[in-house]
Amino acid sequence: MEVHVDVAKVGKYAVGVSGDSVEVVERPGGGISIIIIDGQGHGRAAKRMSHMIANQAARLIEDGARDGAVMRVINDHLYAFRDGQVSATATLLSADLAHGCLVVSRNSNTPVLVAAQGQARVLDAPVEPIGVRRLLKPSLTHLELLEGTVLVGFTDGVIHAGRARGASFSLEWACQLLTKDLTARELADTVLEHALDLEEGRPRDDMVVAVLKVAGSENKLGIRRISASYPL
């Protein structure tokens, strides 16, 4: 098996700088994690904050910290740094080879979608954003590391797309999409394009779609690849 990751993001229309940050980091015991941070507000100030938090989470993972501990530390750091006056949402999607499982960690008002063995479901347990309280627990979900399993995380710009004009993003539609035989990139692109269509091509909020898919592999040498596309 191998893990495929794809991230698609866009900033709020006419703002340019996205306040959402995403980091993809290799785990020291094997595997990979996607860190999704939605900073409060928009533009450069939100970007600086979300980027700082995402980088700290990445460093903690690289140092061997467990996902639940990572979420608690970034909460404590933001709370101390901004005296509980600034919040951010955080989602962490991990393929943890050291423990042979997938881990979903959330302190976010947006759900994570999971599809396995032809069935899809929504992980949406109510949790608070980071930075608002000293003692804050994330929602943690452990899943079996099975070929074909797909995780999809968002920021709220995606699930709130179209609300200003009476339309709505359908989680049911997205769950059905996950059960189709699509690549990680096709899933990320399709979901983001749907959200942009609901916003008539002018997103009112920053948007991130991140996909982690466990796929079969004939890669006997264990070759690892990372690719990126960044507009200038």
Image (cartoon, grey):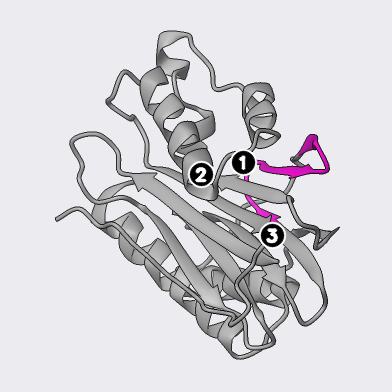
- Check disc 2 and report the residue beneath it: 155
Asked if 107 appears above or below 32 in the picture, the reply is above
Q: Which numbered disc, 2 or 1, marks the residue that appears first in the sequence?
A: 1
Classify mark 3: residues with Cα within 10 Å, few (<14), some (14-19) or many (20+): few
Q: Which numbered disc, 3 or 1, marks the residue that appears first in the sequence?
A: 1
Tell us which disc is closer to us: 3 or 1.
3
Under circle 3, the secondary element is loop
| Residue type highlighted by circle 2 | Thr
Under circle 2, the secondary element is loop
Mark-to-mark CA distance, 3 and 1 = 29 Å
- Residue 227 is left or right of residue 45, and the answer is right
Q: Quadrant of residue 55?
A: bottom left
- Residue at the image point whose x is 56% and y is 68% from the top: 79
**Which numbered marker is on residue 216?**
3
Q: Quadrant of residue 178?
A: top right
- Check disc 1 and report the residue beneath it: 110
Image quadrant holding the C terminus, namely bottom left
Dominant secondary-structure state across the stretch colored magenta: strand
Q: Quadrant of residue 67?
A: bottom right
Tell us which disc is closer to us: 3 or 2.
3
Residues rendered magenta in the picture: 106-121
Q: Nearer the viewer, residue 75 or 104?
A: 104
- Residue at the image point whose x is 82% and y is 78% from the top: 99
Q: Which numbered disc, 3 or 2, marks the residue that appears first in the sequence?
A: 2
| Residue type highlighted by circle 1 | Thr
How far across and down, in percent of the image, does residue 145 sit? 80, 63
- Residue at the image point whose x is 49% and y is 69% from the top: 24
Under circle 1, the secondary element is loop
Check residue 108 for magenta coloring: yes
